[in-house]
Image: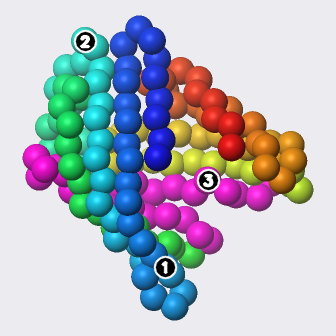
């Protein structure tokens, strides 16, 4: 589950439920729900030419994820409006013993990059740059 907020204009919630299949667990079908709202946003087009708007309406999704070489995750989903979204990313790229990198990009021209510093076995700091959300942080 991931959530992001910028108090002036952006709100986003996405929750998924699924299961990895097979002996090697490379394939992951799942269903989910998402809600996105952006104040003063006009209708946009994604890389497939589909029109979309972050209008604050709840959408249900059916999707699958497949793990590519170098453990990059390819995720494809379709929502209740028939819009297809494809995302490519990885969140645990080892850079050093305590530092990991992260990136993702998708067909809606959204992208993310970040670093994770592992403080202890159960505590990590993750500053993330997401262009439309300014700066986001997670603790895990």
Q: Is residue 87 left or right of residue 82?
A: right
Question: Does the CB distance between marks 1 and 3 fall below 8 Å?
Answer: no
Q: Is residue 121 left or right of residue 100?
A: right
Q: Is residue 71 shown in magenta?
A: yes
Residue 69 percent coordinates (x, y): 56, 75
Q: Is residue 139 left or right of residue 2?
A: right
* Front in this rendered view, residue 107 or 13: 13
Residues packed near mark 1 inside 10 Å, few (<14), some (14 to 19) or many (20 plus): some
Residue 121 percent coordinates (x, y): 84, 53
Label annotation for residue 75: none
Label annotation for residue 91: 3
Can you tell which quarter of the image residue 14 is in? top left
Residue 110 percent coordinates (x, y): 40, 38
Comes first in the chain, label 2 or label 1: 1
Quarter occupied by the C terminus: top right
Q: Is residue 49 visible?
A: no
Residue drawn at 10 percent across, 46 percent down: 81
Question: Mark 1 sits on what residue?
Answer: 26
Residue drawn at 53 percent across, 39 percent down: 112
Question: Does the CB distance between marks 2 and 3 fall below 8 Å?
Answer: no
Can you tell which quarter of the image residue 59 is in? top left
Q: Is residue 111 left or right of residue 9?
A: right
Residue drawn at 64 percent across, 35 percent down: 138
* Front in this rendered view, residue 67 or 124: 124
Q: Secondary structure at mark 1?
A: loop
- Rounded to the nearest whole Å, what is the CA distance between mark 1 and mark 3? 16 Å
Please say if 46 is above or below 69: above
Question: Mark 2 sits on what residue?
Answer: 40
Residue 114 percent coordinates (x, y): 65, 39
Question: Does the CB distance between marks 2 and 1 fall below 8 Å?
Answer: no
Residues packed near mark 2 inside 10 Å, few (<14), some (14 to 19) or many (20 plus): few
């Amino acid at each position: 589950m991931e959530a992001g907020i910028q108090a002036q204009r952006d709100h986003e919630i996405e929750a998924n439920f699924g299961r990895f299949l097979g002996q090697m667990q490379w394939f992951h079908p799942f269903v989910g729900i998402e809600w996105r709202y952006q104040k003063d946003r006009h209708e946009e087009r994604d890389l497939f030419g589909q029109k979309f708007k972050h209008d604050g309406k709840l959408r249900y999704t059916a999707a699958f994820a497949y793990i590519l070489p170098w453990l990059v995750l390819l995720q494809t989903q379709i929502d209740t409006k028939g819009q297809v979204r494809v995302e490519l990313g990885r969140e645990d790229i080892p850079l050093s013993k305590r530092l990991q990198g992260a990136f993702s990009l998708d067909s809606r021209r959204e992208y993310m990059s970040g670093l994770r510093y592992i403080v202890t076995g159960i505590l990590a700091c993750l500053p993330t740059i997401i262009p439309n959300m300014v700066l986001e942080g997670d603790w895990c």
